[in-house]
Each structure stands twice: as C-alpha cells, then as structure tokens.
Image (cartoon, rainbow, N blue to C red):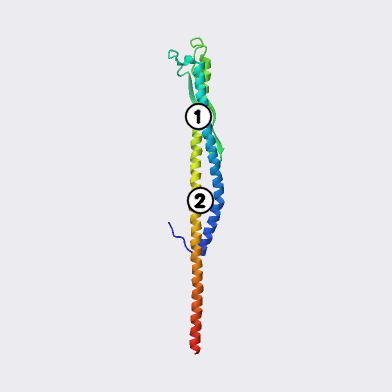
Amino acid sequence: MARTALNKSTLHKQREQLKLYRRVLPSLELKRMQLAAEVARARAAVAREEEQLAAHKDRVAAQLPMLANREMDVSGLVRLEGVRVGEENIVGVRVPVLEGIDCAVADYSLLAKPHWVDTAVAELQAVAELWARVQLARKRVEILARAERRITQRVNLFEKILIPDAERNIKRIRVFLGDAERDAVVRAKLSKALHQRVAEETEA
C-alpha cells in the first residue's frame, strides 16, 4: 500500500474523498435496507408458492385418486415444453418474472381414455405452472440475496475501511503539518535571535 504524502495537497484530497464517502454511504445503506426487505419478501413468496404447489398436489390426489393406478398410464400426457420469462427491476436489480408456460398435451382418444383424463390434463398443467412459479421464486431469492451481499460488502468497505482510513490520514497530516509549522516558527525565532546576537556582538 502506497504511503500517504504528508502535505497540504494530500490533506485537501483526503478531505474531499471523506466528504464523498460520507455523501455516498447513506444511499448505499438505504439500498442495502431496501434489498434486505425485498429478500425477505421474496423468501415469503417462495414459501407461499411451495405451499400452493403442495396444496394443489394434495387436492389433485384427493380429486383424482385414479392417477395412482399404475394400470392407467398417463405418463407423457402433459409435457412442459417451455417457460416464458420476463424481467422486472427491483431496487436496481433485474429479476425474472413468469409470463407463462407452454405445455404439450399428447393426443388421446376420448373413447380409449376415461372421462376424468380431461380434468387430469387441466390439473397437470396447473401443477406445471405452479412448479415453474416455485423455481422462479427461488431464483429471485438467489439473485436478490446475492445483490444484498454485494451492497453489504460495499457498505462495510465505506464504513470500516475507506472512511476510517481517510479520517486517520487527515489526522496524521494535520498533526504533521502542525508540528512542521511549530518547528518552522521555533527555527525562525532561533534564527532571529542568533542574527540579533551576532549583530550585537558585531556592534560591540
């Protein structure tokens, strides 16, 4: 680390930097608080989405117990083909938002399959959408938590390193300059006294 030059120019720079750090810190702290609140909201959203998914699965199991019958093969009936994702800006952080899902429904004969298969198709599509919502909700938490960690590191950098360093540097420079000024005054007085004594001795 480079040594700080103990002069008036450096003192001015350090004072300007300290002013800047103190001006920036409150906005960083505000952003950190906002992100912390958004992370908490996002985590609550994950819990809600997971609860809805579990509740829906239970409802489907109760409504269509015949899905558990291995003789009735409904695998591949509904296939999730894609998840359409948009973006949303939350406190300057871009996070994904679900726009929709694309499901492919296999062709099935109305005569070969029982009457409840239509209901099963609709319910399986609903489960697929809820599953996609859970995945995106988790991704949002991950992105927001990462942004919160980054901003917390920046707040700590300002609070614990940059501001204290600038304050210490200013104090050191002021002490050094004060000592140098006193030394200069003492040297000037001694020089004046010496000149005066030499002048007096010359006259004598």
Where residue 109 appears, as percent x and y from the top left, is 50, 12
Residue found at the very far bottom of the displayed protein: 204
Residue at x 50% of width, y 70% of height: 182
Q: Is mark 2 on a helix, strand or loop?
A: helix
Counting other residues with Cα less than 10 Å from the Cα at mark 1, is it few (<14), some (14-19), or many (20 or more)? many
Q: Quadrant of the N terminus?
A: bottom left
| Residue for badge 2 | 159
Regarding residue 83, the answer to whether it shows in the image is no
x 50%, y 74%: residue: 186
Query: Which quarter of the picture shows residue 15?
Result: bottom right
| Alpha-carbon span between mark 2 and mark 1 | 37 Å
The answer, for residue 179, to whether it is visible in the render is: yes
Label 2: few (<14), some (14–19) or many (≥20) C-alpha neighbours in 10 Å: some
Mark 2 or 1: the one toward you: 2
- Give the number of callouts: 2
User: Could you say which is closer to the camera, residue 163 or residue 129?
Assistant: 163
Residue 86 sits above or below residue 29 on the image: above
Question: Where's residue 47, x and y in %?
Answer: 51, 30
Q: What residue type is labelled 1?
A: Val
Query: Residue at position x 53%, y 15% from top?
Result: 118
| Image position, residue 6 (x, y; %) | 48, 63
* N-term mark: 2 or 1: 1
Residue 134 is marked as 1
Pinpoint residue 130: horizontal percent, then vertical percent.
Answer: 52, 26
Q: What residue type is labelled 2?
A: Glu
The residue shown at (50%, 82%) is: 195
Name the disc covering residue 120, or none: none
Under tag 1, what secondary structure? helix
